[in-house]
């Protein structure tokens, strides 16, 4: 049976939409038209993604916002229930749920994900997060281990249990360091085998975890040259585990008829009207507890954080944006996520102007 999951389609460069479940999306801005992460908007976006042939939608699992004037990402739809709703309403696009390993018991998680996979006849994907945002752990009363070894050792046990529930023919007991479980099983299994799994990490421990467990590793892109080296290193790590893993990155888009218009809009929302206290709070938290970005990136890219959470900018005319995406592909990435200030308003223009250019470059097929 051919998979219904678009993560397995033939496109050389796969595209996803990132963070529409969180207020502000990825843009840390005070402008009135900043992203409103209402269910109504998410639903509109899901239907649009279906129509234009975007491969996947990826949420951010967030529990506390970053303060500032807008409390960036402070209003956020819970990703597992959001994912179920979107998959029930759409027909084609893959939708991921993002799970913090420490906040969801693995038996509950395995059952929730299998259920969602059935709702969608196999279009579900899982994004595993092993922890970095300390205030959220404090809110749950759960200790965030200082060292990455412990975070990922816990994550490994969590993931092993989920996977075993999905694949084991018999009930099993689990006597681990973090979980002691008896007579474990869960039916139904996922719809069509183990769903696609992604993990984002930059630390050595995180990357080893991804190489061992994930189909796709997400990594931030500082510049294409560094990106190329990164892709090679990650793929080599996968090979050591006997696995062929795809490497994805994440980017934000400001696409307008001319480069000048795109740059002016970027200046307006990501500089003149940036929510700087929220930018600084996000950068502080990431700098202290995660290794997602190299240290020098924080000083260099304050504006990139305001524009799109620090991810790779694609700002310009449709030709510029298509060229930027082709560069990402040439660096070896299997795909990238996209985010827009107003996803619903801006995706149609991107789809109309940029997607045909990517088709001409041989990176994507037209939607059937
Ligand atoms: C594409 C992408 C998606 C992510 N999704 C989330 C998320 O939803 N919630 C979260 O707390 N962290 C998220 N992260 C953070 C990472 O999962 C990871 O915890 C962080 O990079 C720190 O890991 P490290 O220190 O091992 O590199 C994401 C990162 C990327 C690049």
Image (tube, helix red, strand yellow):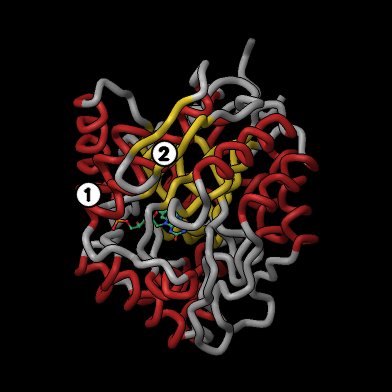
Residue at x-position 25% and y-position 67%: 297
> In the image, 161: left or right of 233?
right
Say few, some or many: other residues with alpha carbon within 10 Å of mark 2 (under 14 / 14 to 19 / 20 or more): some
> In the image, 308: left or right of 42?
left
Residue 149 point in image, percent of width and height: 22, 52
Residue at x-position 74% and y-position 66%: 38
Location of the N terminus by quadrant is top right
Residue 143 point in image, percent of width and height: 35, 67
Residue 207 sits in quarter? top left
Which of disc 2 and disc 1 is earlier in sequence?
2
Q: Secondary structure at mark 1?
A: helix
Nearer mark to the viewer, of 1 and 2: 2
> Is residue 55 in view?
no
Q: Secondary structure at mark 2?
A: helix
Location of the C terminus by quadrant is top right
**Toward the viewer: 21 or 254?**
21
Quadrant assignment for ligand 1: bottom left
**Toward the viewer: 6 or 133?**
133
> In the image, 177: left or right of 121?
left
Find disc 1 in the rendering and name its residue: 226
Find disc 2 in the rendering and name its residue: 159
Q: How many marks?
A: 2
> In the image, 7: left or right of 201?
right
Tell me how far mark 1 sits from mark 2, CA to CA: 30 Å
Residue 239 point in image, percent of width and height: 23, 24
Residue at x-position 56% and y-position 69%: 261
**Toward the viewer: 111 or 99?**
111
Residues marked 1 and 2 touching at CB (< 8 Å) = no
């Amino acid at each position: 049976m051919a998979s219904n999951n678009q993560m397995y389609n033939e496109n050389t460069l796969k595209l996803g939409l990132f963070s529409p479940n969180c207020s502000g999306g990825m843009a840390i801005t005070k402008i009135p038209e900043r992203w409103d992460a209402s269910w109504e908007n998410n639903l509109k976006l899901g239907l649009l993604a279906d129509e234009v042939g975007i491969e996947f939608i990826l949420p951010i699992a967030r529990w506390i916002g970053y303060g500032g004037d807008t409390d960036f990402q402070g209003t956020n739809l819970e990703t597992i229930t959001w994912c179920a709703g979107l998959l029930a309403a759409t027909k084609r696009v893959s939708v991921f749920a993002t799970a913090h390993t420490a906040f969801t018991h693995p038996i509950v998680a395995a059952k929730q994900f299998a259920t969602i996979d059935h709702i969608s006849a196999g279009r579900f994907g899982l994004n595993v997060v092993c922890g970095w945002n300390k205030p959220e752990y404090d809110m749950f009363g759960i200790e965030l281990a200082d060292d990455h070894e412990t975070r990922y050792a816990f994550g490994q046990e969590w993931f092993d249990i989920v996977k075993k529930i999905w694949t084991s023919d018999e009930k099993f007991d689990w006597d681990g360091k973090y979980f002691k479980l008896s007579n474990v099983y869960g039916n139904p299994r996922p719809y069509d085998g183990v769903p696609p799994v992604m993990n984002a990490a930059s630390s050595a421990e995180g990357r080893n975890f991804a190489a061992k467990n994930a189909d796709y590793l997400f990594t931030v892109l500082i510049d294409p040259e560094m990106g190329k080296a990164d892709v090679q290193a990650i793929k080599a790590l996968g090979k050591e585990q006997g696995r062929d893993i795809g490497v994805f990155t994440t980017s934000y888009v400001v696409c307008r008829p001319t480069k000048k218009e795109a740059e002016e809009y970027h200046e307006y929302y990501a500089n003149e009207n940036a929510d700087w206290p929220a930018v600084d709070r996000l950068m502080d938290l990431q700098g202290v507890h995660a290794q997602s970005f190299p240290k020098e990136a924080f000083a260099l890219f304050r504006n990139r954080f305001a524009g799109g959470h620090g991810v790779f900018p694609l700002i310009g005319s449709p030709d510029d944006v298509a060229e930027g995406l082709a560069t990402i592909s040439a660096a070896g990435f299997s795909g990238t996520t996209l985010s827009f200030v107003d996803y619903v308003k801006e995706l149609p223009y991107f789809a109309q102007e940029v997607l045909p250019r990517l088709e001409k470059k041989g990176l994507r097929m037209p939607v059937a």
